[in-house]
Amino acid sequence: MNEPYGYRRRELVEPDWTRFPGWRDVTGADWASAQWQRAHCVKNIEQLKGVLGDLVSEVFYADLAADQQRFATMSMLVPPQMINTMVPAGAADWTAAFYADPVRRYMIPVASDRRADWPSHPNASRDSLHEHDMWVAEGLTHRYPTKVLAELLSTCPQYCGHCTRMDLVGNSTPSVDKLKLSLKPTDRYAAMLAYLAAHPEVRDVVVSGGDVANVPWRNLEAFLNRLLDLDSVRDIRLATKALAALPQHWLAPDVVEGLGRVAARARSQGVNLAIHTHVNHAQSVTPLVARAARVALDAGVRDVRNQGVLMRGVNDSAEALLDLCFALHGEAGVLPYYFYMCDMIPNAEHWRVALWQAQQLQHDIMGYLPGYATPRIVCDVPFVGKRWVHMAAEYDRELGISWWNKGYRTQLEVAEGITEGRQYAYYDPIDTLPEVGRKFWSRDAPSRVA
Ligand code: SF4
C-alpha cells in the first residue's frame, strides 16, 4: 500500500432503485418481498435492457452477448437487489460507470473484460478443486479430516461469473455443459446423512450448494434437524450468498422463525450454527443486508461470517478490502473471515491475482481491524485445501508456480497410494509474470508442471 488506509465511519445506504428506468414505479413493499425479487431477477440481455433502458449503450449489450456466446461459464441470474448495488449513486456517463463497476465486473461479465492473451490458464479446469472426485455420496465432498461440504442442490438465487463450482452450479452455457445431480433430493440427503452417521470423525458440516436459500425452508430445516440428531456434528455452517444478494429471503417471516427454531436447538446442544455469506465489495453492504444479518444473529445464529473472493478489478486493493471489512464488521455485524483467491476455472484469468499480490494485500490490511475480524486471504490449492497465502512451501515467481503441502491425506490420496509430503502446485496468472515466465508458458504449456 502506498498510502496508509484512512478509516472513517460510513453510513450504509440503500441505493434508490427508481434511478433505473425499469423500476421507476416499484414500491418499497415490492422491493422488500423475496417473491418480487425472485420474479424480477435478470436472466438475459433483454431483461437487463428492460431495467437499464437506454442508460447503457448498445456497445455494452453486444459485448455482453459476445461473452455469453464465447466465454461465460455461468448463465445470467442477478436479483434486483444486486443490480441496485451497481453504480449506486448514478452517473453522468452510465456506460463508462457500468463498465467500471466492481459488482458488475463479476456478476455481469462482458467479453472485453476477459484477457485476450490468456483467457484461461493452461492448467485451469472445470472442477478446479476436484470436489467431485472427493464425493463420498452424491454432493458430499470429504477432503479434510474432520470437515465435509454438503452440496444440497446445484442452484442459487444468483449466479456469479467466477463461481468455483461452475462445473455443477447453474444452467449450461454455450461453453459449459453442466454436470447434473442424479439423485432425488430426499435420496441425496439420506445418503449424505448415512455417511455422516457412519463417520463420527466428521464434526463440521458446511451445508451449501449452490445456495441454501434455494432449498425450500421446510426441507432445509428437516435436513438440519437430522444433522443435529448426530452427536458427532459440532459445527454447522450454512452457505448463502443470498444474505447479501437477496436479503429479502432471509428476512421472510417463515425463514426467520425456522432459523430461530434450528438455532435454539443448536445452542441447546452446544453446536455452533453459523451463516457464511459471500460479499465482495462494500457497495453490496446495504441497510437491508445489515438487517438480514442482525435478524439472523437475533434468531440465535452464533456468527454471520463473510467469505469473499479476491478479484482483479473488483476488490484487489487494500482500500477496497478494508472498506468492505469495515462495512461488514462495523455496520452489519458480519465477521470478515476469508478472502479466497479466485480459483483456476476456465476464462478467469482477468479476475485472478498472483500469489505475491495476495501476500502483499494480506500484509497491507493488517493492523486496522480487530484481530478476530481481520480476514485471512487464502489460496484454495487443488488437492490441498485452503491455505493462508504465506504458507507456500516454495514459490517460483518467474514461472508463477507455488508449491504447497499438508499434514494429512484425503481418502482419494489414500486410495491412490499417494504418500504424505507430496507437494501440489498453484499457478499465477501468466500475464502477471516477467517475460521469462510468459515465454516459458508460451513455449512449454501446459503439461510440464501440472
Ligand atoms: S452464490 Fe456461490 S455457488 Fe452460487 S454462483 Fe455464486 S459463487 Fe457459485
Image (cartoon, helix red, strand yellow):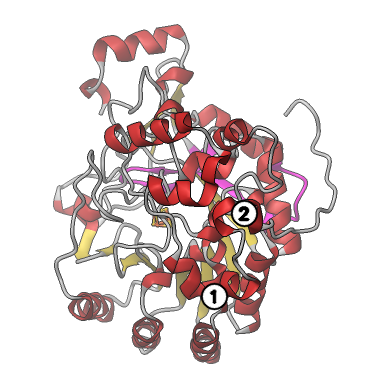
Q: Nearer the viewer, residue 205 or 322?
A: 322
Where residue 140 appears, as percent x and y from the top left, is: 27, 66
Q: Which residues are magenta?
A: 365-391
The C terminus, quarter of image: top left
389 is within the stretch colored magenta? yes
Q: Is residue 392 visible?
A: yes
Counting other residues with Cα less than 10 Å from the Cα at mark 1, is it few (<14), some (14-19), or many (20 or more)? some
Q: Which residue is mark 1?
A: 33
| Tag shown at residue 284 | 2
Disc 1, SS: loop
Residue drawn at x 57%, y 33% is 95
Where residue 306 appears, as percent x and y from the top left, is: 57, 58
| Tag shown at residue 407 | none
Where residue 61 appears, as percent x and y from the top left, is: 43, 36
Between marks 2 and 1 in the image, the one whose residue lies nearer the viewer = 1
Q: Is residue 310 visible?
A: no
Residue 166 lies left or right of residue 315; in this view the side is: left
Q: Nearer the viewer, residue 154 or 109?
A: 109
